[in-house]
Amino acid sequence: MSTRRCPKEIFFDATELEHPKPLEMAIDHLKRLDADTYLYMRHRKNPLPLLEIAQNNGFYTLSREAEDGIWHILITPSPETDLETLLHV
């Protein structure tokens, strides 16, 4: 039986920020992620450039639009992290 720890969330709300701040700040957060952490970001739109950068650098991503039109974006370097279960939508 494995004893996996629950990963630590780094929360980033970019809903009030203007371009290019959300991308710049999210990339700074990605640099600090390790196998025990994930980024949970809220944004007004689906940040496709961020998702592409993350995926090209070996990160796993999930983005989902909530009923209120806010996008919830989760990014982790760990293939063991089940992002679907961490989604707050």
Image (cartoon, helix red, strand yellow):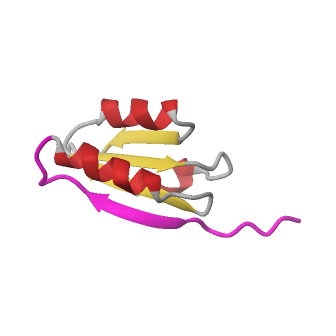
- Indicate yes or no whether the magenta region holds residue 12: yes
Most common secondary structure along the magenta stretch: loop
Name which residue lies at 39% across and 56% down.
29
Name which residue lies at 28% across and 53% down.
25
State the residue in front, 21 or 15: 21
What span is colored magenta in the figure? 1-19
Quadrant of residue 5 within the rendered picture = bottom right
Q: Is residue 51 visible?
A: yes
Residue most extreme to the right: 1
> In the image, residue 9 lies at what x, y percent?
46, 65
In the image, taking residue 15 as reference, residue 72 lies left or right, namely: right
- Indicate yes or no whether the magenta region holds residue 59: no
Name which residue lies at 17% across and 52% down.
15
In the image, taking residue 29 as reference, residue 19 lies left or right, namely: left
> In the image, residue 34 lies at what x, y percent?
57, 58
Against 3, residue 80 (above or below) is: above
